[in-house]
Image (tube, helix red, strand yellow):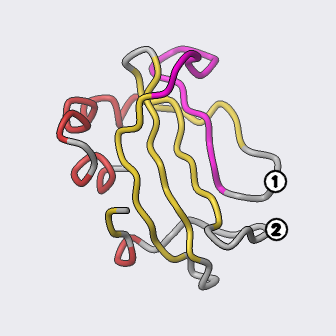
């Protein structure tokens, strides 16, 4: 997420201080590594319209090309979305950081 903040929209850098205070509170059920995030002591992720902080592509260790989006809602980082660009239907891991590039 540090790379996404550093390489996302200019406004994304204002969210950097939140990174140490995020927790995973939900996961996608399809096998992708997408996670819902909550800030601080909150037990639930934020809701409402999404503001995309970063949108990039990368390649997983399994060789799957993926899209990666970092979402914010209610001024809090709320979701790290990772999806197969080819529609892969089996579980896959996070992209390797050295493969990330802006979309």
Left or right: 102, with 82 as reference point: left
Number of numbered discs overlaid on the protein picture: 2
The quadrant holding residue 102 is bottom left
Where is residue 47? Give x, y as percent. Answer: 59, 17
Q: Secondary structure at mark 2?
A: loop
Disc 1: which residue: 30
Q: Is residue 20 magenta?
A: no
Task: Identify which residue is drawn at 75% across, 71% down.
Answer: 88
Q: Is residue 8 above or below residue 46?
A: below
- The answer to the question of whether label 1 and label 2 lie on touching residues, with beta carbons closer than 8 A, is yes
Task: Identify which residue is drawn at 63% across, 18% down.
Answer: 44
Where is residue 21? Give x, y as percent. Answer: 40, 28
- Of callouts 1 and 2, the N-terminal one: 1
Along the line of sight, the residue nearer the viewer: 57 or 42: 57
* Disc sitting over residue 55 in the figure: none
Where is residue 25? Give x, y as percent. Answer: 65, 30
Left or right: 18, with 84 as reference point: left
Task: Identify which residue is drawn at 28% across, 48% down.
Answer: 8
Q: Which residues are magenta?
A: 33-50
* Disc sitting over residue 89 in the figure: 2
Q: Is residue 39 magenta?
A: yes
- Marks 1 and 2 sit apart, C-alpha to C-alpha, by 8 Å
């Amino acid at each position: 997420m540090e790379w996404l903040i550093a390489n996302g929209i200019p406004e994304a850098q204002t969210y950097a201080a939140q990174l140490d205070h995020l927790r995973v509170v939900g996961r996608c059920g399809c096998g992708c590594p997408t996670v819902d995030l909550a800030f601080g002591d909150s037990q639930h992720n934020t809701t409402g319209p999404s503001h995309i902080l970063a949108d990039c592509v990368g390649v997983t260790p399994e060789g799957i090309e993926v899209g990666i989006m970092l979402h914010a809602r209610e001024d809090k980082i709320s979701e790290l979305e990772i999806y197969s660009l080819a529609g892969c239907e089996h579980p896959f891991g996070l992209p390797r950081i050295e493969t990330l590039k802006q979309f």
